Image (tube, helix red, strand yellow):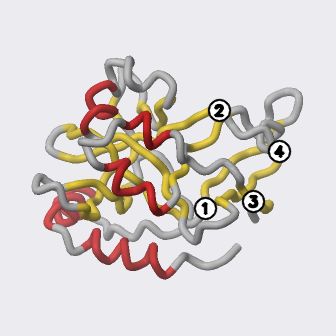
Amino acid sequence: MAPANPELRELVKEMNRSRLAERFRKSSGEPLEAEGEIFPSSVLPVLAVNKAGEQRVFPMKWGFSGTGKLLINARAETAAERPAFRESWARHRCVIPASWYFEWEHDEKKRAIRKYALRPETEGLIWLAGLYRMENGIPVFVILTRPADGSLTWMHDRMPVLLPRAGIRDWISPDTPPESVMQICLTKLRWEQAV
């Protein structure tokens, strides 16, 4: 697989310059790198609007605290109605940049057998649509998912909502109806077996 994208490295640098990054570093005692494969509870650079309505990069932790478990995804089809996501769907949307996302192929007994790295055919970075909220003074996010494109259902029945670069500003703007942006999400992906 290709090394980390230079644009993503710049977003990580921008995230680390924020005052909020210092709060994360103090609480974890570790630098915010966001390189390599990431997992729930990781702190990542996330695009959202600030109080002045300007697009900025913020450090955010992956996962909403749920009733006994961490919520890492939200179904795009039901997020507007679910109490855990309703307000975020309406007013607090974000975009998570990444080089790839990973998915596992499963056998007939639902055992993971092969790991794949996926990304849109035409984009350099991928832009995952997400929702965020504040928990104990720290921003946290979930990734929106949708039914998988027909070419991917052999691997998994769901996929992240992937936005084209041109849709980022509309998605994170609280003035844009989220349903209108969902119409432009990307579905054509390429994949390779991950090492």
Q: Is residue 171 left or right of residue 133?
A: right
Of the 4 image quadrants, the one containing the N terminus is bottom right
Above-or-below relation of 191 to 86: below
- Front position among marks 1 and 3: 3
Calculate the distance from the C-alpha at mark 4 to the C-alpha at mark 1: 19 Å
The location of residue 71, given as percent across then percent down, is 43, 32
Q: Residue furthest bottom?
A: 6
Q: Which residue is mark 4?
A: 113
Q: Is residue 123 left or right of residue 55?
A: right
- Front position among marks 2 and 4: 2
Residue 114 seen by the camera: yes
Q: Is residue 140 left or right of residue 41?
A: left
If you read the primary sequence from the N terminus, does the residue marked by circle 4 or circle 1 appear first?
1
- Front position among marks 4 and 1: 1
Marker disc for residue 147? 2
Q: Kindly identify the amino acid type of the residue bearing the numbered disc 2.
A: Pro
Q: Kindly identify the amino acid type of the residue bearing the numbered disc 1.
A: Trp
Marker disc for residue 100? 1
